[in-house]
Image (tube, rainbow, N blue to C red):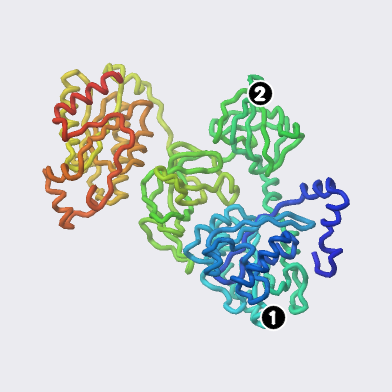
Amino acid sequence: MTHTTDDTIYQTDALIAEDIDAYLEKHQHKTMLRFITCGSVDDGKSTLIGRLLYDSKMIFEDQLAALENDSKRVGTQGQDIDFALLVDGLAAEREQGITIDVAYRFFSTESRKFIVADCPGHEQYTRNMVTGASTADLACILIDARKGVLVQTKRHSFLCHQLGIKNLVLAVNKMDLIDYDQAKYDAIIADYRAFAESIGIEGFTAIPISGLAGDNITSKSDNTAWYDGPTLMDHLESVEVRLDENMARQFRMPVQWVNRPNLDFRGFSGLIASGRVKPGNTVRSLPSGKTSTVKSVVTMAGDLDEAVAGQSVTITLDDEIDCSRGDVLAAADSPPEVADQFESTLVWMDEAPLVVGRAYWMKLGTQMVSVTVSEPKYEINVNTMQHLAAKTLNLNSIGVSEITTDRQIVFEPYAENRALGGFILIDKISNRTVGAGMLNFSLRRAQNVHWQAVDITRDDHAAMKNQKPRVLWFTGLSGSGKSTIANEVEKKLAIMNRHTFLLDGDNVRHGLNKDLGFTESDRIENIRRIGEVAKLMTDAGLIVLTAFISPFRADRQLVRDMMGEGEFIEIHVDTPLDVAEARDVKGLYRKAREGKLKNFTGIDSPYEEPEDPEIRVNTVSMSPEEAADHIISQILPLK
């Protein structure tokens, strides 16, 4: 694309007027490039995108008129057009002259369609930048020619590298403000190259530009006669997109939906993540491992002879194999891995820090599983690239940690396949997205540990005891009466010849959990261990009673998820804080009020009451024996 005459630039306009069908057909088959602009604050990212939109004639007349008015009213270029206002639409962005949220814009040229994400440069908005970069094929890293390589330049470059963006453009912007000095430009390139090599970036394309003046954006600039490389637009139009790489890989399609409109049709719908597929191919459904042959590849426009990465299709098979949403259809002779323990790189995106051991939802492609995160191996200082010791991850922190899912998932390392290697973490209570991550590899121990088959099953154990195993989970504030009531219930069950075992919070901390304190992470691990022990006891056919504060809903839900259907009975020993504190049998509330006992539930650590427990007892209106009788009356019909 050049700027010589209007006739040589915007031929699409003429084609639209002559033959709209031909134009639409041509437009439909253009390749799509997703790219981001990133870098430090005030490097000119929004201005550059505005210039690209302006030069590609993607602005309507009313938008242009509004832009001219806004530029005079709130712009930063005097009476000239402030191109940044095309992208920075939030009131706070315009007032402060900064980008806060990711702004996506579409534009098109004769050769290609583009979606560009303008990412904020401030460190506090790193999570927004990661969001924009997660789907990008190319990153345009801007540098202010007056300032050179800054800390945020390095931060964003590192993040782009971690997120697997291989096409990097180093756009040295505002060359007009240094009089197009080649020596200064060369020094910046040398400085950046040294940094890039230190973090593993193998190559990048450097271009001297001026977003405001238009130098080397869509046409070669006479001001940089010493530069013989492509313009930014030339490079964007010709660079290889990720889709081409994905087509060359083995076939992978996460199943998004089992399409069953009637009894005669059953297909598996999804977006092909990589490779190609056509009728007659042998595919494997994972994690089950069952194989079948592709009967047809169906789309709304009709059956296809072949489908490739990037297409959404429905695949029908010759055999009725077990396959559902979250499973992955893959080439039978080269399937992806299946595991439940991984090393991962995490970017923490929530104001509240990572809680080690807490169960989060993990969404990887179409798979949704429960996951727990171990204490980070290290946190990465993106300013120095040092590995720092860390107990948790805070907002915008990046670290490496081991994670464990509650069941095996289908995956490939992120470096090989974004769709099967990239995931997000979701808080189970608030449904907030709290983190984004990349799977590096599965842990060997996950592949070497297998379930040992036994002849006497948990059903056999239960039958011998003539009872249904279950867990009676007593939860409530300290001093609510959990242990007292649980003890009364166990005595009554013993009289009835029931086989029971009581796990009491204090007793367990004398042995199994004596290494744990009372921080949030330790409380979570305390409950996780109890849950595992309780599960083993139900496998033995026992009725297990537990008396723990267990203050967090997510942790109680974690234990519930371990058990079989209907085996977890949550019993809320409902006692107001003032009543529990008045009892204070152990003197714990007094110590907590005096500051001698930290992280005490109800004082300086929260208690999340059950929202819908199976049983609720009020110890203000009930004696322990009455409460026990009420519980027995509720659980006996569940036999």
Image quadrant in which you'd find residue 191? bottom right
Q: Residue at position x 62%, y 25% from top?
A: 260
The front one of 495 and 336 is 495
Residue type at mark 2 is Phe
Quarter of the figure that contains the C terminus: top left
Is any part of residue 505 visible from this angle? yes
Q: Position of residue 49 (x, y in %)?
A: 66, 64
Q: Circle 1 sits in a helix, a strand or a loop, which is it? A: loop
Residue lying furthest right: 18
The front one of 257 and 576 is 576
Q: Position of residue 467 (x, y in %)?
A: 28, 19
Residue that numbered label 1 is attached to: 180
Give the vertical position of 620 relative to 604 (above or below).
Answer: above
Q: CA distance from mark 1 to mark 2?
A: 65 Å
Quarter of the figure that contains the N terminus: bottom right
Q: Residue at position x 66%, y 23% from top?
A: 265
The front one of 180 and 376 is 180
The front one of 527 and 338 is 527
Q: Residue at position x 70%, y 36% from top?
A: 277
N-terminal-most mark, 1 or 2: 1
Residue type at mark 1 is Tyr
How packed is label 1: few (under 14 Cα within 10 Å), some, or many (20 or more)? many
Left or right side of 374 for 245: right
Residue that numbered label 2 is attached to: 265
Mark 1 in CB contact with mark 2 (< 8 angstroms): no
Image quadrant in which you'd find residue 229? bottom right
How packed is label 2: few (under 14 Cα within 10 Å), some, or many (20 or more)? few
Q: Position of residue 322 (x, y in %)?
A: 56, 26
Is any part of residue 52 visible from this angle? no
Q: Circle 2 sits in a helix, a strand or a loop, which is it? A: strand
Q: Position of residue 635 (x, y in %)?
A: 27, 23
